[in-house]
Image (cartoon, rainbow, N blue to C red):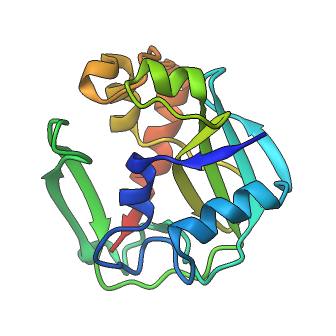
Amino acid sequence: MSIFLTPFARTRLFPRTPRGNTIQDCTPEQFERHLNEHAPLKVLDGYAPFCKLHVHRNWTSTRCLTVPVTDANRHLLRSAYEARTREELPVLVRWFEGVAPPVADYLVVILYSREQLAKEGSPIDADWGVVGCLYTATPEEIPMAPITMLRNALGVEEGGSGVPIDRDAYRGAVEFWENNANWR
């Protein structure tokens, strides 16, 4: 099985201007090579048949992706309308500023099949393409952000995958994201 770091994931996980909330101590090439040379601890099914999650023990100093919202840190939450790419419409996002989560124990790599990436207009030669990565304290997936679920349901022309909303998964994601936020 071969894995390729897609341009979409590369810009988000390894931005031109390094940030503390992205993958640390590793180049994009080293990251891709590690995924191809080291078997995951486990493989989880994603939200659709074309999506798999490979759980790896964190070999970097990358910090956890999310922080629980508490009364003590709620005042550090920020929000803005942002787009992930130039082609996508901006959506409301929120994040913490001024917090430092612990180093993640796991990197949960989100993979899409070659066929799905071709359908979305991003063909690859490898079997699987990295579209994202979760940095977690447990070897499990954190819920997809509700706005990502909505974008996926809108279809590939709006930056999604074309997978309809699973209302129960959406409600679970809302519960998680009401109580947690990303950080910058």
Residue 39 visible = yes
Quarter where residue 51 is shown: top right
**For residue 131, side relative to residue 44 (left or right):** left
Identity of the residue drawn at 53% across and 74% down: 27
Locate the C terminus by quadrant.
Answer: bottom left
Question: With respect to residue 23, does 169 lie above or below?
Answer: above
Q: x%, y% of residue 93? A: 25, 52
Relative depth, front residue between 64 and 61: 61
- Which residue appears at 82% of the width and 54% of the height? 40
Q: Can residue 139 be seen?
A: no
Q: Is residue 113 left or right of residue 175?
A: right
Residue in the image at 51% along x and 19% along y: 166
Query: Is the residue 133 above or below the residue 106 in the image?
Result: above
In the rendered view, would you say 66 is above or below 145?
A: below
Q: Residue at the front extreme?
A: 125
Residue 50 drawn at (x, y percent): 62, 24
Residue nearest the observer in this picture, 13 or 165: 13
Q: Is residue 157 above or below residue 95?
A: above
Q: Quadrant of residue 77?
A: bottom left
On screen, residue 181 versus residue 27, left or right, reads: left
- Image quarter (top left, top right, bottom left or bottom right) of the N terminus: top right
Residue 159, position as x, y percentages in the image: 30, 30
* Closer to us: 74 or 62: 62
Count of number-bearing discs? 0
Asked if residue 103 lies left or right of residue 98, the reply is right
Where is residue 98? Give x, y as percent.
31, 85
Q: Residue at x 34, y 68 (%)?
A: 15
